[in-house]
Structures are given as structure tokens and as C-alpha cells.
Amino acid sequence: MSLFNTRKTESRKERSEKFLLSQRVRINPNLPEIANEADAEFKSPEDAVKRAVTAFLAAQIAIDICNGETGTESAEFFTNIIGELGLDNELTADEKKYFALADEHAPRISPEDANQFQWRIEMCMPLFWACGFLGNDDLPFPSDITDTSDLIKLLGGCHSFAEVMSHVKMHTPSEILDNADVCLRMDWACVEARLKNDRSICGDLMSDVVMEQHKGFNWLIGAFDAEDWDNVRAHT
């Protein structure tokens, strides 16, 4: 999302609020500004890429389950990719359950659970964007699920982690915090719209996408001690 053809003399909070009002999204002037550059605990590019790629591939298995498959074939396929990239040790406890499906005797995962898990694709998007993998300077406005077709092609053409890292063009800490701040305020609007049953509060925002991206940003900048990927929370 491009915040930001606004005056840099304005605070980050002011720029975020101006952008959201231009998108017909209601603001909460009482929400504080997100952490500044000095206080944020940014993940390194390498850690961000490892987490994003691993979580993204795990979510692909969940998508196949939602499409009526057992997950066994896709788990085998993505296990080979994880091994080729040297990311075997990066799997979280939740992700291991999906990759375990490569063993046809492993406990099955219900379509309902897989449907919930597949939303983690959106949790990855702030990480991919921050590392420059989305093909442009802006994180797409979250009015719909993110198109990942170009990302799949990019990752599919990589055969080592070093090759993946060669695509990194890291955004600045200030740019990352700009987008994290506006995402926090978007999530507040989505929650408020749900509580008041009034879609006009959040404009064209897709609330599930916003919530997952908010969690991704929290992990990326270390907000609210968000270290455990499986249990990151969105705070508004």
C-alpha cells in the first residue's frame, strides 16, 4: 500500500490516518503510533526469508487439503523443496503437522483446520514485501487475498537458499514501520466494523487478510514480544 505521497514533516501516525481516510477507512485517533526505529526489534533479512518461505510452503499443503486432497502428495513435494533449500530445521510445531502428511500413516488434517491454516499465507506477505519479493515497492492494499502467482514462480526457480536470498531488496526500517503502523489501524477498523456490524467503518478492507498481515508485521518488528510464529497475536 502506498502511503505515502505526504509530507515527511508529519508524524507516522498522521500520515497513516490521512492515508486511511483517503481510502474511506475510519480511524481511531487514540491509537498510539507504532514503535519507532530505535525501539523496534527487526528480524534480519535472512530470518525473515526463512520464516516466510517455510510458512508459505506449509500453507500450500493446507490449500491442497482444502481442495479435497489428503495432503500426502503435496507434503512430499514441498518436503523435497524444504530440504533443497536447507530449511528443514525452520518448521514450527504447527507446520510440522502438515509436512508430516508425507507419511500416509500420519494423522489426517481436517479441511476445517486446513482452511484456518491456509490464511497464514497472508501472514507471510509483510515479510515477503519487506524483503522485496513482491515485484514492486508497495504492499498491495488488502481489499482481497494477495495474488501469489509471481511469488510462486520466483520461489519455484530457486534451488538453494542462497539463490532465494539473491532476490532480497530490503525495504528500510522506516518504510516497514510506516506499513506496520497503517496495518495496525486497518485492523482496528476491521474489528470495529465486526463489533458494530457496520461494513462502512472499514471501507474495502478484507478483515481476514488485514488481521493476518498485522500478525506478520508484529513478528517482523518484534511488537508485543511476537516471537512464536504459531501464536502471534494482532493487538488493536
Image (tube, rainbow, N blue to C red):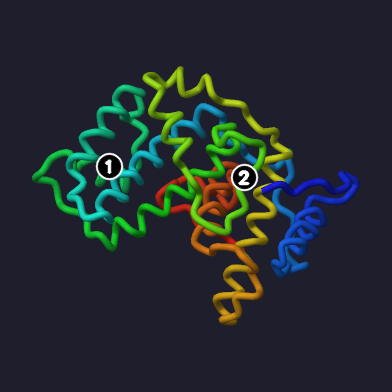
- Whether residue 40 sits left or right of residue 146 in the image: it is right
Seen in the picture, residue 224 relative to 51 is either above or below; the reply is below
Question: How far across and how far down the image is residue 134, in percent?
Answer: 56, 37
Seen in the picture, residue 50 relative to 111 is either above or below; the reply is above
Mark 1 lies on a secondary structure that is helix
For the C terminus, the image quarter is bottom right
In the rendered image, which residue does mark 1 sit on? 96
Which residue is at a point 84% across and 51% down the rendered structure image?
A: 11
Question: How far across and how far down the image is residue 101, in percent?
Answer: 19, 43
- Whether residue 209 sits left or right of residue 83 in the image: it is right
Which residue is at a point 30% across and 56% down the rendered structure image?
A: 114
Which residue is at a point 28% across and 34% down the rendered structure image?
A: 78
The quadrant where residue 88 appears: top left
In the rendered image, which residue does mark 2 sit on? 139
Q: Amino acid at mark 1?
A: Lys
- Categorize mark 2 by other alpha carbons within 10 Å: few (<14), some (14-19), many (20+): some
